[in-house]
Image (cartoon, rainbow, N blue to C red):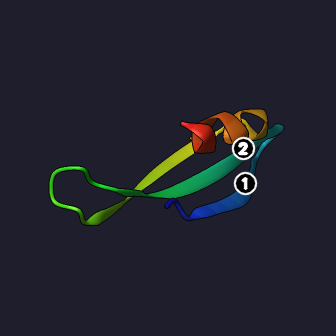
Amino acid sequence: MAKKAVASLQTGSKRLAKAIKMVKSPKTGAYIFVEKIMDPAKVKDFFSK
């Protein structure tokens, strides 16, 4: 199960989004957080992986 969080960032003329996904590690079973700053159009692709 993955938890999703998205924050909108604006720097100059560019609009960016910071996406945070919680992923369960296959080795240890612990949850880790994966953060990425990207174009808002690519957020759905990031969460679908």
Q: Is residue 18 above or below residue 16?
A: below
Q: Position of residue 21 (x, y in %)?
A: 51, 56
Q: Are marks 2 and 1 in contact (CB under 8 Å)?
A: yes
Q: Which mark is residue 16?
A: 2
Name the element at disc 2: strand
User: Which is nearer the eye, 26 or 8?
Assistant: 26
Earlier residue among tags 2 and 1? 1
Q: Does 12 sit left or right of 7 as displayed?
A: right
Q: Which mark is residue 48?
A: none
**Alpha carbons under labels 2 and 1: distance apart:** 5 Å
Q: Position of residue 24 (x, y in %)?
A: 34, 58
Q: Quadrant of residue 31?
A: bottom left
* Residue type (three-letter) at the residue carrying disc 2: Leu
* Residue type (three-letter) at the residue carrying disc 1: Leu
User: Which is nearer the eye, 20 or 31?
Assistant: 31
Q: Is residue 12 above or below residue 19?
A: above
Count every numbered label the image shows and give the total: 2
User: Which is nearer the eye, 49 or 18?
Assistant: 49
Kindly identify which residue carries mark 1. 9
Q: Is residue 38 above or below residue 5?
A: above
Residue at position x 49%, y 61% in the image = 1
Name the element at disc 1: strand
Residue at position x 25%, y 66% in the image = 30
Q: Residues within 10 Å of mark 1 (few under 14, many from 20)?
A: some
Q: Position of residue 8 (x, y in %)?
A: 75, 56
Q: Position of residue 29 (x, y in %)?
A: 23, 62
Q: Residues within 10 Å of mark 2 (few under 14, many from 20)?
A: some
User: Which is nearer the eye, 39 or 44?
Assistant: 44
Q: Does 13 sit left or right of 44 as displayed?
A: right
Residue at position x 16%, y 59% in the image = 28
Q: Residue furthest left?
A: 28
Residue at position x 76%, y 41% in the image = 40
